[in-house]
Image (cartoon, grey):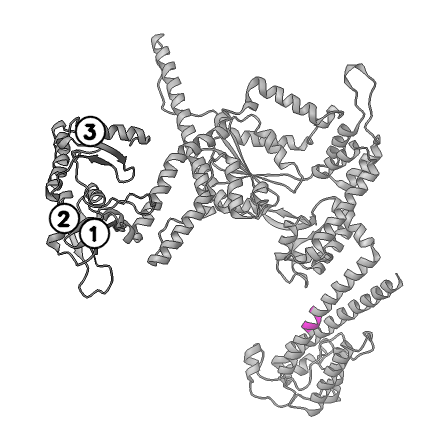
Amino acid sequence: MRRSEGARRKHIASLLPAELPHSASISDIGPHARDGGGMVSFTFLAPEDPDSARQAAEAVVGAVDAHLAKGGRRRWFGLAPIRALPVRGVPFTEDIVRMLPSKEVKVEFGGPDLTVEQIYREFRRFGRILDIETQPSTSKDTPRWAIVHFTGLREATRARNCAHGDVVGSTKLALSYVKQHAEHVVIQWLREHTKFTIPLAAAALIAIIYAVFDPIREFCVENKITHRFDLSHLPLLGDVRRAAMRSLLRQGAAPKEEASAWVGLAGHSDRLRSLLDDPPESFVVVVGPHGSGKTRMVEQATAGKKYRIVIDAAKIARQTSELGQMTQLAKQLGWWPVFNSIISITNAIDLMVKATTGGNAGISATPESQARRILETLALVLSNMRRRRTDALKAEESRAAKASHSRGDHRLDTGVHTIPSADVPVIVLDSLMDKDLTFAPIILEWAAGVVESGLAHCIVTASSISGYHEVQRAQSQSATSLLSLDDAPPIEAITLLQQQLAPVGTAGGKAEQHVPGAVSDDSIAHAVKVLGGRLEDLQLLVQKVHAGEQVDAALESIIQRAITEVRKHAFDNDAEVSQNKHTWTPEQFWYLLTELAQHGETEYDRVRSSPLFAGSDDALLGLAEAQLITMVYDYDRPSRIRAGRPVCYAAFARIMADAGFASAMTVRMNKRFIELETAKIRKAEEELALLNVFHASADAHAALVTGMAAIAASRGGGGKGAADGLRPEAFVAQAAAAATDDCSVAQPAPKPRSWLGWLFGGGSQNQPGAAQGRSGPGGGDCCASGAQRVAVPGVPHELQGRVRFLLRAIHDSQLKVDQWEDECRARARRLASL
């Protein structure tokens, strides 16, 4: 173990006796660094007889060995004694890297093969032999060889260094180490049973990681909640830091910019505070359109809470991958360290086990499972915080009871320890229902469990009432409190702008400074009329005015931006936007735009039942999610539809004032209406063709065919008016006249009930008496009058109503088609004139 070769030489020399037989003297000492030990060469005056000379040399070696045995010298790393052995061959000392010592020594024969007995006698002196393996006699490989298996590594190194080059009889021996390939029995079993070992090893590794890092993560999450080591929350440093940031961000700005919200939010904020003062038993859902001040109101109401946890779904949704969303969630909750590679490692192990064994190891991890683990850690931290707070309250009450008892007061301990409302944590799920977030159901389910356990209050902000319904479904056991925000009333919006845009004074007694572009009350009223009470747009207007723009210019830029957003998101006029899959069509939104621009709001049920929407609300929900429209709910159901933002009304009016675009979109919408009504006409014609029951009168059948051809020609006759073609009323009159010239003529003889009668549920035959009774002045069914119901000749009685309904549907649809075609031609002429 000595690194210096000189130190090794000195150590070997210290093991040798001072005097050797036959006046032998040490001539050379060569330490063997790899195999251990050393080669000692000695010289002496040998007799002339070779046998006597050999005996004299062995006597020298025996004297050295006896000296070592007498002194009891042993190796420091083992109990075996140090021995001295004669080197009878020619030592081959090398430093080949791959030729490492092993317990097996290969003996190659440079002559006749040695027997097992000869090999044993030659190598037994070096130590115990485990086995001797000889080359098969049938093998033709040369040179011939045998392998000696020693029980220990030291015995093999002795044989390799002392017997290499020795001559036994007429055979010269060449020794080399055999590379070891054998494994430990335990390692071999583990390698051969990967079905058990790989899952167990992976599970053990993950368990060790979690056992080590879970306490660290709990510590970090709790510090994120309590801000225990956050310097900004220290009394002195926090105040200095906040003052420095205000000074840096508001250089040259008026102090009244700090006005943030209108008075209308104060009532909702007070109600939210009162709800947070109660024990945590249910969700609180704050619903309001985008820019209505939901987040700011929640911040104001929870400002007095010691422990506030915010999960910002908007920041999480900005991440493009589930792994990134999970990492952002961990960052917001202070869950650290985050090992994203563990997910890939466990999935790879599970895939490898499945490929090798055919079964799943069950250790694979996903971003969703990691998100659940993060939330479970947060719930555990909240539970521990509540337990410690409860124990502290118990200790305080116990001390108070002891103190009162010492004073002679006796109070009854009720055992109920209520945590102060300020110490109850508040969890804010900001815009959780408004974003396309993979973990939204997981977070909502977890929050419901936390609230039901009474660990914390939970506030959810949403832009539509659908978020309120989602929360109700997640917490079905108890009621959910709802706070509904809306745009500010005009008077409060005007007050807000007056506070932020009025001239203000400066400190130090200097003269008043006016905001660039001084604002008059008329300008503020006009801005509020356009922007409404939407806080987002009002703040944008204030920022632009403070930046030096005039109110009219700032208002115009906001309107133009709204127009751009509407065109970009609602209509497929951009190649990039057109690749996105919308739930609505441009024609559907144009229909809504015209309705909202003309009437301000429209009925939800009327729009939903219109031909363009066909009773489906998918397009309306998509438009509401894109903030293009807002659905007003009454008694938890949609009742009216408004524009997404008040400024959108000005944008809609500008878009409709664009003659070219408005004409093109109107043509597209009318063509879609024409397609729908044409489909209705075609369907009615197909049903009339199936109801081919005019077999009683050839003239009536011919009149029906002629009438149907006239209807078809009128529908596609290249712009003919309503009076140019043959209408169903005229056709019915001609059919009646062709069947009979007298309305009082008796009806044909009764016929058996047809299968069509069973289908439509009418009578089985035409009844003459009934027909004659209806032919009086009050009835007139036989007479060809456009205002009266006319009996179609040749049609069974049970089909009269259905045939009249189909003809009337064709007539009404054709009138609509003619009207839309006329409007399309007018719009086309207007486009041509531009």
Instruction: Tell me, yes or no, whether the highlighted magenta stretch contains residue 345.
Output: no
Q: Is residue 633 visible?
A: yes
Question: Residue 76 or 201: which is nearer the viewer?
Answer: 76
Query: What secondary structure is marked by label 3?
Result: helix
Magenta stretch: dominant SS? helix
Amino acid type of the residue tagged 1 in the rendering? Leu
Crowd tier of the residue under label 2, counting other residues whose Cα lies within 10 Å: few below 14, some 14–19, many 20 or above:
some
Mark 1: few/some/many CA within 10 Å (<14, 14-19, 20+): many
Query: Bounds of the magenta span?
Result: 676-680
Q: Mark 3 vs mark 1: which is more N-terminal? A: 3
Q: Residue furthest right?
A: 833
- Residue under numbered circle 3: 15
Q: Amino acid at mark 3?
A: Leu
Q: For this view, does 746 lie left or right of residue 404? A: right
Residue 669 at what x, y percent from top left? 74, 63
Q: Is residue 60 left or right of residue 790?
A: left
Helix, strand or loop status at disc 1: strand
Q: Which is more toward the observer, 193 or 695?
A: 193
Residue where numbered disc 2 is placed:
122
Measure how far apart labels 3 and 2 are at the Cα level: 26 Å
